[in-house]
Amino acid sequence: MARRVVITGGASGIGRTIAERFAALGDRVAICDASAGHIAAVQAQMPEALSVQADVTDERQMQAFFNQVKAAYGGLDVLVSNAGIGGPAGSIETLKLEDWRRCLSVNLDGAFLACRWAAELMRAQKSGLILLMSSTSGLYGVPNRAPYVAAKWGLVGLAKTLAMELGPAGVRVNAICPGAVEGARMDQVLAMESDFTGRPAAQIEAQYSQGVSLRRFVSPEDIADMAVFLASDAARQITGQAMAVDGHTERMV
């Protein structure tokens, strides 16, 4: 039976890869994304998906999106709360409050809003899975990335708490914690850290790779594999967990 899957930030990067993977399995996929251009591309390339431009930090837009999901699909089996931004790089005394708030708003408030409406649908049907996209930064401290790290640690705490709240209703909740993921977003992070530290981006990239046992970045496909596994019956007893997909982090810096 086709599952009903919602992916926030699902029109590019990791989210798009996850959306394509679930769609390839025959599932019914709904995507929201803040980028009109990315949504237009999904509508052209994945016409069977419900694709909506919506800002995860906007309560009205998110409520309207979930109302569309409910009207189209009648319920929800899997939420992948994936929308997020990297936030600024800098020592704590140099960071601006507006940048701090923006990073936490997209990464943490967006997850809260998505979970709130997903939980309502899943409680009613007494089943479902919520996946929160955290990071290995949500398991370790990372100097000069305080807003991002705080948000990602918050997502792990949210996953564990919601697993307790929703477990009696048959709903599982887990966090996925990717390591360094190859792609455009990681390129932006490397450039940002290079600007802050004055070190070449290639040197920072090599440092990230040397900090994991497998000595390589993970791919969006690796993250999609974990999402699909956690949505499978093989993972029926897995909840309240922070699942690292990172090649085994030995050090963050």
Image (tube, rainbow, N blue to C red):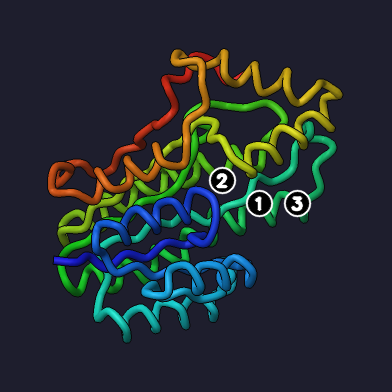
Residue on which disc 2 sits: 151
Residue 110 appears left or right of 163: right
Callout 3–callout 1 Cβ contact below 8 Å? yes
Mark found first going from the N terminus, 1 or 2: 1
Task: Please tell me how many numbered marks the rendered image carries.
Answer: 3
Q: Which residue is mark 3?
A: 99
Q: Is residue 107 above or below residue 182?
A: below
Real-space Cα separation, disc 1 to disc 2, in angstroms = 7 Å
Position of the N terminus, as image quadrant, is: bottom left
SS class, disc 1: helix
- Relative to the observer, which residue lies in front, 45 or 251? 45
Where on the picture, by quarter, is residue 86? top right
Q: Residues within 10 Å of mark 1 (few under 14, many from 20)?
A: many
Percent position of residue 204, x then y: 70, 21
Above/below status of 237 relative to 46 = above
Please, what is the three-letter code of the amino acid marked with disc 3? Asp
Other-residue count near label 3 (Cα within 10 Å), few / some / many at <14 / 14–19 / ≥20 = some
